[in-house]
Image (cartoon, rainbow, N blue to C red):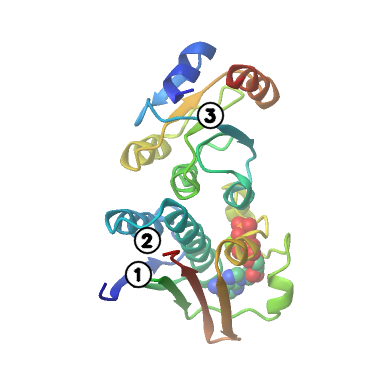
Amino acid sequence: MTVQQLQQTLGWTAFHMADPGRQVTGGYAGDLLSWVMGRAERDCAWFTIMSNQNVAAVALMADVACVVLTEGVVPDADLLRRAEEKEVNLLGTGEDTYTAACRFRGCLE
Amino acid sequence: METIKLVYPVEGGDLIEAGEASSKMKLTLKKLGLPQDVIRRASICMYEGEINMVIHADGGQAEVEVDADQIIIRMQDTGPGIPDVTQAMQEGFSTAGQTARELGFGAGMGLPNIKRYSDEMKIETELGKGTTVTVRIKIPQ
Ligand SMILES: Nc1ncnc2c1ncn2[C@@H]1O[C@H](COP(=O)(O)OP(=O)(O)OP(=O)(O)O)[C@@H](O)[C@H]1O
Ligand SMILES: [Mg+2]
């Protein structure tokens, strides 16, 4: 499944689509950046409520397919700018992290 | 392949710009056409080291050497040093302050991540003088 298919199927917000055709193969949920760095796998969707710009750098280093901001969190202006600069796919949803992850899981199958 | 040397200054205290040196290095490694996994591991090590220099040591410098079979990353600062390296290497140990924690840092996972994603890691530190973290990542042939 591509990031765009994911976003459209689940009706999530596309804050920034740098690479809509990128494949998503798994998921990781967490807000502590070094946990994400250590545990998230390449090409996963990363669910977080963190909205500061360090999220863009972590997404780039860990090579995740997209970031999903949950709980209705919106990216701050710096994060949005960084996501554009670093070509990071940035999505959002009003759902809580558990609900979003469950729906995503359903989609992956 | 000739050895390529890259130098990245890292500003202290500036969590806003933190990660820029790592981002630049990643771009350069991509241009060199290195394997994805090697780039990812080097980027994670560099990012964790860079953030540590910003949060714990008021900045420093990263030197990266790339040749045909390995990447060496040397992250050097003149910060306070690490009193107990064994303790610092433990998952969950952190002295990060409130501001860093609010941004998502301070899980005490940075140094363990460097260990996990590198082939070799060395920490040289002296109290009041500074810390140098050196990392080696092999490039599979
Ligand atoms: N360059 C450094 N200079 C001085 N102290 C350091 C340096 N790097 C790490 N430390 C010390 O080692 C501890 C552990 O570092 P580590 O990177 O594992 O965790 P952290 O930076 O506290 O949190 P995280 O990396 O998970 O955001 C730090 O809290 C700090 O006390
Ligand atoms: Mg750290």
Badge 3 marks a residue whose secondary structure is strand
Depth check: A106 or B141 in front? B141
Q: A92 or B31: nearer the eye?
A: B31
Badges 2 and 1, same chain: yes
Of all chains, the one bearing label 2 is B
Q: Which residue is mark 3?
A: A68
Residues at marks 2 and 1 touching, judged by CB atoms closer than 8 Å: yes
Q: Is residue A7 left or right of residue B24?
A: right
Task: Give the Cα distance between marks 3 and 2.
Answer: 25 Å
Q: Is residue A50 above or below residue B57?
A: above
Query: At label 3, which amino acid type do we have?
Result: Val
Looking at numbered disc 2 in the image, what kind of residue is underneath it?
Ala
User: Mark 3, chain letter?
Assistant: A
CB atoms of marks 3 and 2 within 8 Å: no
Residue at position x 56%, y 47% in the image: B103
Q: Say whether mark 2 and mark 3 are on the same chain.
A: no
Q: Please give the label number shown on residue B9.
A: 1
**Compared with residue A85, is residue A93 higher up or lower down, i.e. above or below?**
above
User: What residue is shown at x 52% (from left), y 43% (from top)?
Assistant: A42
For label 2, the residue is: B21
Q: Quadrant of ligand 1?
A: bottom right
The disc placed on residue B19 is none
Amino acid at circle 1: Pro
- Mark 1 or mark 3, whichever is nearer to me: 3
Q: What residue sits 49% from the left and 40% below the top?
A: A64
Percent x, y of residue B121: 57, 74
